[in-house]
């Protein structure tokens, strides 16, 4: 259900301006999505993320969270080593036969990530019941292009 990074998924994200408008229209559904998180007892580990992009990436770039001088930033990194990054934010998409997949969009440097954050990502990937229920709810509410899920870190 969780898959690898696909540049086209990032390319299709809405601009921040569009996403901000969609958020205003979608706030009424946040409680329903939060209920899914709570039903799986993940409220201390997982949150919702407003899906958007501020700029385009080239296919070999990924957004990687980096810390410098006690400041966190998300930076495009060219040809990152998959062994040194771990996803923390995913977008759900449904294929032509109705199968749900979760695509990573943003990553953490594993040397800077907390062990708890990395463990949460592994736990999330193994929690097929949560991923399926959240995918169905996002699709039911027509919010799969508005909200994704994110590790709280």
Image: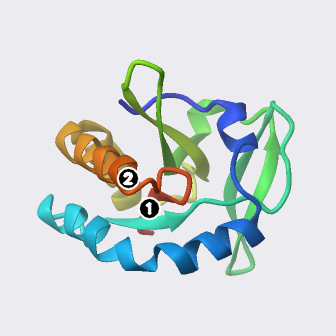
Q: Position of 83 compared to 19: left or right? A: left
Instruction: Using the image as rendered, state which of residue 132 and residue 97 is in the foreground.
Output: 97
Residue plotted at (57% across, 32% down): 83
Q: Quadrant of residue 22?
A: bottom right
Residue 45 placement (x, y as % from top left): 30, 65
Residue 23 placement (x, y as % from top left): 56, 74
Q: Position of 57 compared to 87: left or right? A: right
Give the structural element (helix, strand or loop) at label 1: loop
| Numbered tag placed on residue 114 in the rendering | 1
Q: Position of 127 compared to 65: left or right? A: left
Residue 150 placement (x, y as % from top left): 45, 59
Q: Is residue 19 above or below residue 75?
A: below
In whole angstroms, how far apart are the C-alphas of marks 2 and 1? Answer: 29 Å
Mark 2 vs mark 1: which is more N-terminal? 1
Give the structural element (helix, strand or loop) at label 2: helix
Front position among marks 2 and 1: 2
Q: Position of 124 compared to 91: left or right? A: left
Tell me if mark 2 has few (under 14), some (14-19) or many (20+) residues whose alpha carbon lies within 10 angstroms of its own: many
Q: Quadrant of residue 6?
A: top right
Instruction: Using the image as rendered, state which of residue 89 and residue 54 is in the foreground.
Output: 54
Are the residues at dot 2 and dot 1 in contact (C-beta closer than 8 Å)?
no
The residue labelled by disc 2 is 138
């Amino acid at each position: 259900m969780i898959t690898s990074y696909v540049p086209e998924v990032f390319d299709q994200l809405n601009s921040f301006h569009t996403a901000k408008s969609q958020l205003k229209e979608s706030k009424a559904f946040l409680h329903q999505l939060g209920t899914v998180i709570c039903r799986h007892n993940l409220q201390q580990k997982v949150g919702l993320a407003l899906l958007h992009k501020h700029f385009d990436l080239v296919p070999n770039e990924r957004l990687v969270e980096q810390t410098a001088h006690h400041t966190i930033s998300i930076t495009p990194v060219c040809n990152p080593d998959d062994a040194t990054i771990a996803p923390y934010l995913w977008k759900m998409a449904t294929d032509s036969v109705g199968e749900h997949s979760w695509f990573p969009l943003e990553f953490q440097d594993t040397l800077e990530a907390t062990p708890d954050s990395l463990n949460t990502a592994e736990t999330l990937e193994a929690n097929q019941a949560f991923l399926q229920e959240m995918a169905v709810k996002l699709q039911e509410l027509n919010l799969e292009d508005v909200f994704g899920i994110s590790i709280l870190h």
